Image: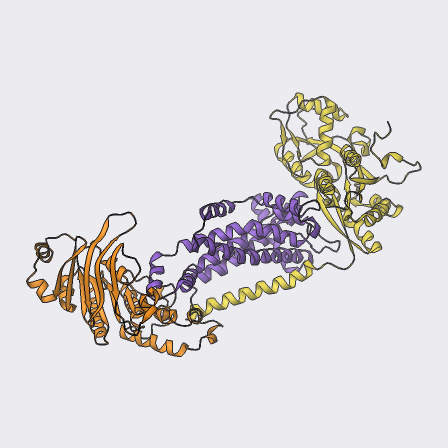
Amino acid sequence: MESLGFFFNATRSAFDLLIGLDPYLYSIIGVSLTVSFWALVISGTFSGLAAFIISFFRFPGRNWLSVLVYTGMGLPSVIVGLFVLLLLSKNGPLGGFGLLWTPTAMVISQTVLITPLVTGVMLSGLDSVDESVVDAATSLGANWWQRIWTVIYEARFSFITALIAGFGRAISEVGSVILVGGNIVWSNEVSYTRTLTTAIVVETRKGNFDSALALGLVLLTIVLAINIVVTRLRGSGFHY
Amino acid sequence: MSVAQNSRRVLVSFLLVLFTLVLLLGSTGGVVAAGEELVLATTTSTYDSGLLGKLNPVFEERFNVKVKTIAVGTGAAIRHAENGDADVIMVHARPAEDEFMREGWGVNRRDLMYNDFIIVGPENDPAGVSDLGKATDAFRKIADSESRFVSRGDDSGTNKKELSVWDAAGVELGGKWYLEIGKGMGDALVQADRMGAYTMSDRGTYLSMKDNLDLEILVQGPVKGGDPVLMNPYGVIAVNPAKYPSVNYSTAMAYIGFVTSPEGQKIIGNYEVEGEQLFFPNALSEEPNFSQYVPKDFRK
Amino acid sequence: MSIVLLKDVQFSYGEGPPVLEGVDLELTRGNISVLMGPSGVGKTTLLRLINLLENPLKGGIVHNFKELSGDEGSDPLSLRRKMSFVFQEPALIDCSVGGNVAYGLMTRSGFINHLWKKTKNIFAFLSSNYRSVEKKVEQALARVGLEDYGNRSIRALSAGEHRRVSLARSLVTNPELLLLDEPTGNLDPRNTSIVEDIIREVKTRKTTVFLASHDMHQAERVGEEVFLLLGGEIVESGSAEKVFNSPRNKRTKDFINGRLVY
């Protein structure tokens, strides 16, 4: 019962934080959304292209590439963070750009992190389009491009699922953004590179478990809201 | 059709909301005000205790600088500095600092402040260390009775200190009673609390969490007249511009100058959490105190 | 006279056993021809070969379509666009009924515009020939008795309706040759007679029909010319009456008597 009370308190303080328009909290949510959003835009574009090429073209090393993609889906975020940290560090190959400890660095590491996942889900969606639909398209006079467009259209739910999964992974990931972003808050309590997840790390480190849990609930609410919208879209068939 | 139109409306409004949020919140979070930036890599204890929240704004306003505070362990802070990814570090592990200086990564080290470590454990004190008064004796007794001990195991300043005390006590580590958790001080305290184990903590973190813990101070540090071995001095070091021309050396020196100035020292001395002073400034002294600028064994 | 001519066509899937071992077949323009034979004998394969979805290992297939000359006469895409193939499975695209029916029209013009159009979004205005497409789609749906189904999702339809949508999808382009693979398989009597009426109606529009069926009664009802495929060869051909009443081959008799298991 004691733990139930703990959850109740956390829910209440999460609610209080949200309606209290706490600028610190909203700047953290802003950084979380912005960074994950741009990572998703970049990764989505790249993954769409990669999935397209792997699915529709036969070239040497294609099987290895798809094995690489599916393996990369489980990439630990700390490994990605470490990799990007060494890459962007002053004595690393891209050190000259001075991107370490910036939101851009976080976008880079999240993009690297979610691209295999997004590509993999898109790829399996494209590969699972029924062969008979492809035949039907051919038979109805579709040329190569029209056929491919039809396959992409048939796989559209996988593309949406891929983007949602990618966004979910990006916004709830902590290992890489804390390493390359530095978890920075300006002195006026406005987040620069602190996200919901890294804020949870700070609160946990300080022993403020109720604040940490409240932040966790805010994060869950965002992810849940996105998933509800998508589930509703899919439930309605999404063809208007 | 109605379901269909509805879902389209849901999609459009969802995208609109997301875009608006990104634009609104993103603009507040992402914008960097004009002025120079200084990357301060420091230990979690200075940041999490709230001290930097008092110290840095005054500096920022005075020098028109924005401080990017990267709060990590002492080991990681030093490593970032060695990679050229920090301008100034504020850490608490003198041997590691000396190493950093000897290898030429840092220049102009200054003593900044100190507090102390304490050994905490469960109220019933199964190993019976509360009357010993000496850290090495206490550690030896914990090891002999194989009472559980939680170690940070994260190469932080606290961890380095703890290992040096084990070393001084002549204890070979290993065995199931000794747990390395690889986490921060708060986590270590919570874990020790849950398990009824001993641990070594900096006083500040312990004080800030005391209310949530059933752990008692069993061996005091020098702040409360206890074992001087548990002294926890903090130093502040500028990254050597000869190693990395890109570091913001002049601002780093301005920062060091500020925090070791009478004004900065006063802020440190006045900082209290729940009525307790956490850090004791020691940058100002009557003596030249040359050894603060160089490795401790310089010219010995 | 002939619209399609097959000469000694042999085929197997990959390294598998031969499916067709030398098929000779001539489809007469304007007829309803029925390809008969037990299940698994290769009827579908034969239709796929005619539709150029597969290439024969050996032998030749000649299509004699009007208005195709020179290079177009040997271009699979151009040839395919003169015929339609209704698969045994409806194989519908996951969009609206109208979107499926318009598909064939739009492969021939403004394809991407069309898919956008069918999702009725802000890109709709891009499609200039949308009105004429819409009209043809409505007519095709009327022919299969699915008036006002255009905006429905195919997910909301029954199996019989799926079959009719897939028929409408093939009729809308006014093909010279209509290929049907078991068009009434698994359908109830009412839907079966609807589909057969459509087949007869198609003939009146000068479309040649070639349908594969294992139902002899259906062959009798609609077929003007019947081919029997057995053991990878056409063993019997001619008018329905001739094949059923005086088969030359012993196995044809077995098949007609129902002794041949299928």
Residue A63 in picture, x, y percent from top left: 44, 47
Q: Nearer the viewer, residue B42 or A225?
A: B42
- Above or below residue C92? Residue A217 is above
- Above or below residue C256? Residue A203 is above
Residue occupying the point 10% across, 63% down: C243
Which color has been applied to chain A in this rendered view?
purple
Colour theme: by chain
Residue A203 in picture, x, y percent from top left: 66, 46
Which color has been applied to chain B in this rendered view?
yellow
Residue A180 vs residue C14: left or right? right
Write down the quadrant of residue A237 in the picture.
bottom left
Residue B155 in picture, x, y percent from top left: 69, 35
Residue B7 in picture, x, y percent from top left: 46, 66
- Above or below residue A225? Residue B51 is above
Q: Nearer the viewer, residue C77 or C139?
A: C77
Q: Nearer the viewer, residue B30 or A236?
A: B30
The quadrant of the picture occupied by the C terminus of chain B is top right
Write down the quadrant of residue C247 in the picture.
bottom left
The quadrant of the picture occupied by the N terminus of chain B is bottom left
Residue A209 vs residue A127: left or right? right
Residue A197 visible in this rendered orientation of the protein: yes
Chain that the image shows in orange: C
Residue occupying the point 21% across, 60% down: C7
Residue A16 visible in this rendered orientation of the protein: no
Residue B54 vs residue A148: left or right? right
Q: Nearer the viewer, residue C239 or B216?
A: C239
